[in-house]
Image: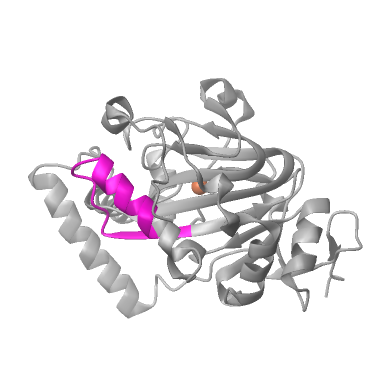
Amino acid sequence: MTEPVLVDWNSEKSAEFRRGVIQARHRLNRAPEFSDLSLASLLNRHPRELCDFCTMGEDPADRESWRAGDPGKLDGQQLLEAVREGKLWINLRDAMNVDPVFKPLFASLMAQLKHLNPGFNPMRAYGGILISSPRAQVFYHADVSETFLLHVRGKKRFRIYPPRAPWLEDVALEDILHKDQTEDVPYESSWDVDAAQIDLEPGDFVSWPLHAPHRVENLDGLNVSITCEMVTKESLMKNAVHHANGAMRRMGFTPKSTKTTGFEAYTKLAMSKVWKGWTTISGVGAKPMPKSETTFDVDVASQDGYRDRAAV
Ligand SMILES: [Fe+2]
């Protein structure tokens, strides 16, 4: 595709990009690459180690209900059917940046974003494709990289919360960066009034500031979205400062500043590198990520699209 991906970008969006919540329109919802047929063959060829198959409960506060499953020998068409009729969430990690069919779309999107936003030059960028059921949800969490989303099919409600306390406590972010916690952070339903609530239709683009917690509820139809993650100089620096603050807290100090400029910030950048080096050598940082155990099998014939495995 040589035509631009984003269709209504302007100077106001440019000024707010990565600083606030931005909405724009894109044209990938009309791209044949996202048809059932094309997604089914992507499901068949994408490396299984880059695919997550998950389900979850109804309560947005019950993140313990998030669990992983096994697609078994089902082919792409059957997996799509199970998602359409059931309660499943499939993440095809890196599909946009490694798959030969989708890579050109991602390259064109990233090139356009760089062109439209002078000074924006991510060091690394990744794009995944999410395929999820009409009633699926993603629990409240904060990503450690800069992220944005292009919605392609179905309808979903997106809520974005401010990237600061009480919605995101410094300690919670430090725990994520120290891998003591997944990207899930504490959530209160009363915070929903503080969120930017956006109902996404096919062709909607949304982006938000680094670390802004968000949660998603699907509203209708088979949902397909592209999620993009980027490592930028700014995200590296911010994460290093929070990581160093976490290291200080683990040594019994109470860090006060989260400033990302000045001498103190650069000292923290160095400190963060030393701590990471030490935990890698000593093995302290090598903790398995939770929830990798598979507790269900995808099953087209079951009402929710999966069958629980018997507890061992
Ligand atoms: Fe996210």
Q: Is residue 41 left or right of residue 212?
A: right
Foreground residue, 137 or 15? 15
| Residue at 87%, 71% in the rendered image | 310
- Residue at the image point whose x is 80% and y is 60% from the top: 82
Rendering coords of residue 112 (x, y %):
32, 47
Q: How is the image coloured?
A: one colour
Q: Is residue 114 magenta?
A: yes
Q: Residue furthest left?
A: 263
Q: Quadrant of the N terminus?
A: bottom left
Q: Judge whether residue 178 can be spotted in this image.
A: no
Residue in the image at 52% along x and 48% along y: 28
Residue 116 sits in which quadrant?
A: top left
Task: Judge by depth and name the residue closer to the eye, 143 or 72.
Answer: 72
Q: Is residue 113 above or below residue 89?
A: above
The x and y percentages for residue 48 are: 61, 76
Report the magenta residues as a range. 107-127
Q: Is residue 76 left or right of residue 99?
A: right
Look at the image and tell me whether residue 114 can be seen: yes
Q: Quadrant of the C terminus?
A: bottom right
The verdict on residue 38 being magenta is no
Query: From what the image shows, is residue 1 above or below residue 276?
Result: above
